[in-house]
Image (cartoon, helix red, strand yellow):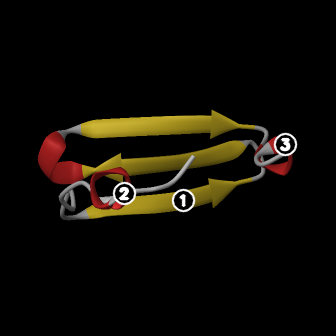
Amino acid sequence: MPLDAQALALKPAAGSGALRYTSDGIWTSAHDVHTLSWWADPAAIGN
């Protein structure tokens, strides 16, 4: 499947935020859009 410019387009940056790692999981936040995401078991990410 070929990629076109629209498929490769990036969404606008959310602005300020954070990425934090702990042995229990990883959390990210985007302060200006008021979101918080959590991924448990960081060793399993990408597997």
At a point 37% along the width and 38% down the height, the residue shown is 36
**Nearest to N terminus: mark 3 or mark 1:** 1
Q: Residue 29, position in %: x, y?
A: 35, 49
Q: Quadrant of residue 34?
A: top left
10 Å crowding of disc 1: few (<14), some (14-19), many (20+): few
Disc 3 marks which amino acid?
A: Ala
Labels 2 and 1: the sequence-earlier one: 2
- The structure residue drawn at horizontal position 21% and vertical position 51%, both measured from the top left corner, is 31
The x, y position of residue 14, in whole percent, is 20, 56
Residue 29 placement, left or right of 28: left
Q: Which residue is mark 2?
A: 4
Q: Nearer the viewer, residue 23 or 15?
A: 15
Q: Residue at x 86, y 44 (%)?
A: 47
Q: Secondary structure at mark 2?
A: loop
Q: Which residue is mark 1?
A: 20
**Marks 2 & 1, CB-CB < 8 Å contact:** no
Secondary structure of the residue carrying tag 1 is: strand
Question: Would you name the residue on which mark 3 appears?
Answer: 44
Q: Nearer the viewer, mark 2 or mark 3?
A: 2
- Residue with the most extreme front position: 2
Identify which amino acid the numbered label 2 is placed on.
Answer: Asp
